[in-house]
Image (tube, rainbow, N blue to C red):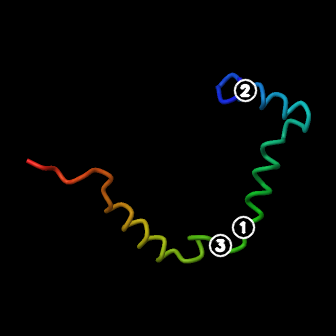
Amino acid sequence: MAGTKTGGRAAAKTNKTKYGPDFYARIGAVGGKKGHTGGFFKNRELARIAGARGGRVSRRGKKTV
Protein backbone atom coordinates (compact mmCIF):
# COMPACT_ATOMS: atom_id res chain seq x y z
CA MET A 1 0.00 0.00 0.00
CA ALA A 2 2.95 2.31 -0.50
CA GLY A 3 2.08 5.79 -1.67
CA THR A 4 -1.49 5.90 -0.35
CA LYS A 5 -3.02 7.73 2.59
CA THR A 6 -3.78 4.42 4.26
CA GLY A 7 -0.20 3.26 3.78
CA GLY A 8 1.11 6.53 5.20
CA ARG A 9 -1.04 6.16 8.29
CA ALA A 10 0.16 2.59 8.75
CA ALA A 11 3.79 3.66 8.39
CA ALA A 12 3.29 6.48 10.90
CA LYS A 13 1.72 4.07 13.36
CA THR A 14 4.61 1.63 12.94
CA ASN A 15 7.21 4.38 13.37
CA LYS A 16 5.54 5.64 16.54
CA THR A 17 5.31 2.11 17.93
CA LYS A 18 8.95 1.27 17.15
CA TYR A 19 10.60 4.60 17.97
CA GLY A 20 8.24 6.31 20.41
CA PRO A 21 5.35 8.76 20.14
CA ASP A 22 7.71 11.72 19.67
CA PHE A 23 9.40 10.19 16.59
CA TYR A 24 8.37 12.91 14.13
CA ALA A 25 9.14 15.72 16.58
CA ARG A 26 12.66 14.35 17.07
CA ILE A 27 13.47 13.97 13.38
CA GLY A 28 12.06 17.44 12.73
CA ALA A 29 14.26 18.89 15.45
CA VAL A 30 17.33 17.24 13.91
CA GLY A 31 16.60 18.96 10.60
CA GLY A 32 16.12 22.31 12.30
CA LYS A 33 19.42 22.07 14.14
CA LYS A 34 21.40 21.12 11.04
CA GLY A 35 21.07 24.56 9.49
CA HIS A 36 23.88 26.98 10.29
CA THR A 37 23.61 29.80 7.77
CA GLY A 38 20.62 31.59 9.28
CA GLY A 39 18.64 31.69 6.04
CA PHE A 40 16.60 34.74 5.10
CA PHE A 41 16.07 35.70 8.72
CA LYS A 42 19.70 36.77 8.81
CA ASN A 43 19.09 39.47 6.19
CA ARG A 44 15.52 40.71 6.42
CA GLU A 45 15.93 43.31 3.68
CA LEU A 46 17.14 40.68 1.21
CA ALA A 47 14.16 38.51 2.14
CA ARG A 48 11.81 41.41 1.48
CA ILE A 49 13.35 42.11 -1.94
CA ALA A 50 13.32 38.42 -2.94
CA GLY A 51 9.71 38.03 -1.84
CA ALA A 52 8.69 41.08 -3.84
CA ARG A 53 10.41 39.72 -6.95
CA GLY A 54 8.77 36.34 -6.54
CA GLY A 55 5.38 37.98 -6.08
CA ARG A 56 5.71 39.87 -9.33
CA VAL A 57 6.48 36.75 -11.38
CA SER A 58 3.34 35.40 -12.98
CA ARG A 59 2.93 31.69 -13.59
CA ARG A 60 0.31 32.40 -16.22
CA GLY A 61 1.21 33.36 -19.75
CA LYS A 62 0.33 36.68 -21.28
CA LYS A 63 -3.27 36.90 -22.46
CA THR A 64 -3.54 36.85 -26.22
CA VAL A 65 -6.58 38.38 -27.81
Question: Label 1 belongs to which residue?
Answer: 35
Residue 20, picture quadrant: top right
Tell me where residue 8 appears, x and y as whole percent: 71, 29
Side of 39 relative to 11 (left or right):
left
Dots 1, 3 in contact, CB < 8 A: yes
Question: Label 3 belongs to which residue?
Answer: 38
Query: Gap in Å between the C-alphas at discs 1 and 2?
Result: 29 Å
Quick one: label 2 or label 3, which is nearer the N terminus? 2
- Residue located 83% across and 42% down the image: 23
Tell me where residue 15 appears, x and y as whole percent: 84, 34
Tell me where residue 53 appears, x and y as whole percent: 37, 68
- Residue located 78% across and 43% down the image: 24
* Amino acid residing under circle 3: Gly
Vertically, is 55 above or below 60? Answer: below
Question: Label 2 belongs to which residue?
Answer: 9
Side of 50 relative to 23 (left or right):
left
Residue 39, picture quadrant: bottom right
